[in-house]
Every structure is written in structure tokens, then in C-alpha cells.
Amino acid sequence: MSRRPVVVVALLVALVAAPVLMVLHHAPVQPLPGRVAIRDALRSESVIHSLVGTHWTTASASALDGRLERVSFFDGAKTVTEVAVDANGTIAGIEEFGRRSVPFGNYQAYQRSLLVVLSLMFILMLGVVPLRRMRNLDVLAVLSLLAAVILYQHGYLRSSVLAVLPGLGYLSLRCAWRGLVSDGGQADSTPIFEWATRSLDPGRRVRVLRVLLLALALVLAVIGVSSPNAIDVAYAAMEGATQIIHGLLPYGHMPGDVIHGDTYPILSYALYAPLAWVAPVGSILSPIDGMLDAAVLAALVTAAVLYRAAAGRRSRPRDLRAEAAGLRAAIAWLSFPPLMIIVSTGTTDVALGMMLAFAVLLWRRPAASMAVLALAGWFKLAPFALVPVWLAPLRGRRLAGALGGFAAVSAATIGLVLALGGVHGPAAMLHAVAYQFSRSTLQSPWVALGITTLQPIGQACVLALIAAAAARLALSSELAADRARIAALSAAILIALQLVSNYWTFFYLAWILPLACLSLFAEPAGATVLTSARERVRESSPAAQVSDLTPVLTEVP
């Protein structure tokens, strides 16, 4: 009976939103007929030069927005080159996939041997025995996302989007179930790492985990800071930050070497202003080491947040079991195979994952948590979808504090926009950001499947999920007190948003995994730890020390 209002709210929102979104939905108008755009691309010397030495069989044209046309050259299902052509037939940008060994980032992060080692480490940290547990299926679902990265590396852009659908779809439903219905209870299980090191006492086990964590952190740092191939988003962030330190609003004042580089909220640029102050970036030819350093730092801070969340507050000077749980969570994050690739591109998505992890960690402090969530929303738009979920369970002074935290960050952000752009600044930002809602791209599940007319229905379902989560939290104080279930609901909503958006890239996985580590991969409620014979001898009576030297299972409190 308590869940019936939640179902009613979700259905009402879906039924109202679906027809409205279908009316509002429209594909961008092609500025040029397709054959004309292809002809203009093939007449360009720069395009001809990019195609020399590569093999292509077909070409297609589609609208990028109302001003630019995308011309894609394919070798079968493999994308060789993409060209942006404006309404006058001028080439606005060229993206070469056929000439590069890797699309973005450090080629060392794509090495098969490294990806295999990281995958095994990920399983070792998060898997459990017995193997027939739902948690292990969750681990495999996360690792299945690596297929999208490998396909993208080799130029199969459309296939990479399709390959990610089973894993993301499963994780979204799993997280929604974990947050809305299940309390996370499961049969007894033992972390695989604990089982594999059952001959070690807890102290040695923790020391092994510390060494693994340090080694992974060093490898990630070296691969990240030495990357020779940062992504265009990193250049756009630094170019916008450079405009800010010069007293200009980024929107409309960017160099233009990154197509629609000004499509992000203002904090995507402002937070990197200190780096631009030290090393300004005026074009994609400028060095961008600061963004690589920032991505590495964000990944390491996220590892620290996950450690803190899993280890909790230690009731004793040294709680080895809690410390081991925290170390496993941090290692799992750093060993997530796509992470090193994502970090080596210098993208801002790693920083967003850090902010989301912080917001969940501070869940029981509404003002601070909502302030961090507002910061994340003005950095990237997607976290704003979590605001109803954050506010729904709050009452009285806690609600006022949360609203105050959100308002303070938002007021400071809008004040910055007004200071840089005057009274027209907010409108300029909204106009630039609106591109994200109107663009068309081949890296969309709906375009890849040829079902763009159904996209509004999927978007309505996401709104229904947000409404259901807010209603469930408003009606259940017990659920609202469970940080793991809040993280699960947040992950479900953000994954669903990614699936119904106009564009998807594997960089967005950096948003999801911290939330999954805080929910699906939190320490199992029925987990057990294998205790070594040596520790058993030390804790048992003298008679037992002689007669019983076998390992035992000890319940984790």
C-alpha cells in the first residue's frame, strides 16, 4: 500500500510528459542537402588530405545543428573521418579517426595487457564467493562497458553505442530496484580478495591492499600526466577559463577551434580559471598539462572519498576490517579499466564524478550536500535532475538549509555570469547551452537504432523515474536515511539520462562508477571475512589452540 502512491505519481508524470515531449521534439534542419554537403567536403583540399592514405567506401550527411552539417566517411561500419560543413560549404572542422592509433588520451592506457590486469583487479576487489550472487552479475555488467571503449578506439562509433546498451540498461534497472524496492539484503558471501588471502592475518591483508592502491595511483598518475592527446573538451574548458581571466564571458568569445566549445555551464570554465591564470590556453595548439593534472587529481580524490565512505568512522584506533573495505573500494575505482583512458584525455567528466561522490558522502548534512550538488549542476547540467530527489525527504530546518546551500551556490554562479556578461550574460549562456538539447549525433542510441521518434517516450520515462524516486523518499524516512540507496537512485537517474540524451560517450562512465561503488558495491550486508588460523589461535583458549587450527568464518559487524 505504501508503494501505490509512488506508482501513481510515476504513471501520471509519464502520461503527461510523453505527449508534451513528442510535440516539442524535432530533428535539426539540415543547412545543406546531403549530396551538396558531401560534394563540398570532397572539394576541400583539407578533407582530401585527411582522406589520402585511408580507405573509405561510403559517405553520409546529417544535421549537426541548424548551422552545421556533418559528413561522415565510412569503411564499412568503421568511421574514417567526420567533417563539419557550414551552410556556405566551408569546412568548419575535421575529425580524423583513420590516421590515429587511439582517438584520445594516452595510447598506453589502451594496451590490452593493462586492460586485462585492471579487469582482473576490479573483479578481485568487488566480486564475492560463492560466485552465484547478484553482486557478481553487477560486476560483469560494469566490465561489459569496456567493449564500448574498445570499439570506439577502432572507429566503430555506432557499434560502441549499441554495445553499451545491455550493460547500462541492466545497471539502470538494477540501481532503480536497489533504491526503490530492495534493502540490499543478500545471502552470506565473502569478498574474493578476502577468500584469496585467507591465509594472511588482517594486518598483512591491509598492507597488501595499501601497496596495490599505491601502485595503481602511481600508474594512473604517470599515464595521465604524460598523455600526448587531450580531448577537445579539455581545450574548450581551458579556452573558456582563459576568457574569464581576461574578464570576458566565454559564450560567444571562444576561439572557435572547438565546435560548440561554449556549450557548457559557466563553472565548467570558471573552476579551471586558476590553471588558466598560470598557463593561458588560446587554441588547441597550446599546451594543456594543467587539465591532465586536474583529471588525475580528481580521480585520486574520488578514490579517497570512496575509501572514506566504505571505511566509515573508526570506533577503535585501528579497525582493520573497515580499513580493508575502504581500500578495496578505492582500488576498485582506480582499477576500473576505462578510467585510465578517461583520465588521460583530460576531460572534465572525472571532476563531475568526484563532485557526485562528495554530494552522496555528505548526504546526512543537507546544506553541504545540496551545495555540492548545485556546484555539480552548474558544472554539468545532468546533476540538476537529482535536485528533487535530494529535497524530497527533507523537512523544516533541514529543508531550509538545503535550499540555502543550493541558493548560495546558484546566486554566486549567476553573479559571476552577470559580472562578466552584464544583463545579457544569462541569456547568452542559456542560448549556448541549449545546443546540447537540439544537436543530432551518430553517437546516440536512438539514431543508431533508427528510432528517434520514440526518444520522447524514453525521456518521459526518465521524468517518471525522478518523480517516483522523489515520492518514495518523501514517504519513507527509513529509505531516506540509507545513503547507499540514495546513491543507487542517483546512479539509476543519471544512467537513464545518458540513455535518452542526444549524445553518449564512454567518458560519462566516470559519473556512474563512484555512485555504483557507494550503492551496488557497498560492503555486502551478509559479508563474511575469512580469518586465518594464526589469528584464531591468538584469540582462542589454550585447549582450542592445540585442537583447532583451521580457518573459520567470522561475521562482519
Image (cartoon, rainbow, N blue to C red):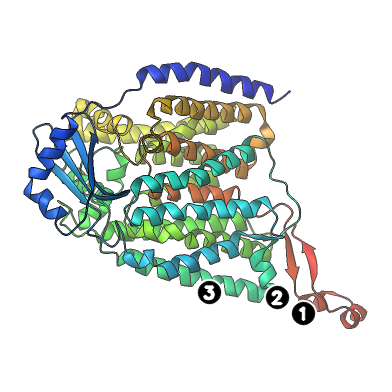
- In depth, the one of 111 and 253 nearer the eye is 111
Q: Earlier in the sequence, mark 1 or mark 2?
A: 2
Residue tagged 2: 201
Q: Secondary structure at mark 2?
A: loop
Question: Where on the picture, by quarter, is residue 379?
Answer: top left
- How far separated are the C-alphas under marks 3 and 1? 22 Å
C-alpha gap between disc 3 and disc 2: 16 Å
Identified at 75% across, 71% down, the residue is 531
Amino acid type at image mark 2: Asp
Give the Cα distance between marks 1 and 2: 7 Å
Q: Amino acid at mark 1?
A: Arg
Front residue of 57/138: it is: 57
Which badge, 3 or 1, comes first in the chain's sequence?
A: 3
Amino acid at dot 3: Val
User: Which residue carries the number 3 mark?
Assistant: 211
Residue under the point 20% across and 43% down: 244
Q: Nearer the viewer, residue 536 or 516?
A: 516
Residue found at x 66% / y 71%: 196
Instruction: Give the residue number, with chain letter if any, for mark 1.
Output: 534
Question: Taking 268 as reference, is 180 above or below it?
Answer: above
Q: Residue 503's spot in the image, x, y percent?
A: 35, 39
Q: Tag 3's secondary structure? A: helix
Label 1 Cα crowd, 10 Å radius (few <14 / some 14-19 / many 20+): some
320 vs 300, left or right, is: right
Image height of 126 relative to 390, above or below: below
Q: Is residue 234 above or below residue 477?
A: below
At mark 1, the secondary structure is helix
Q: Are marks 1 and 2 in contact (CB under 8 Å)?
A: yes
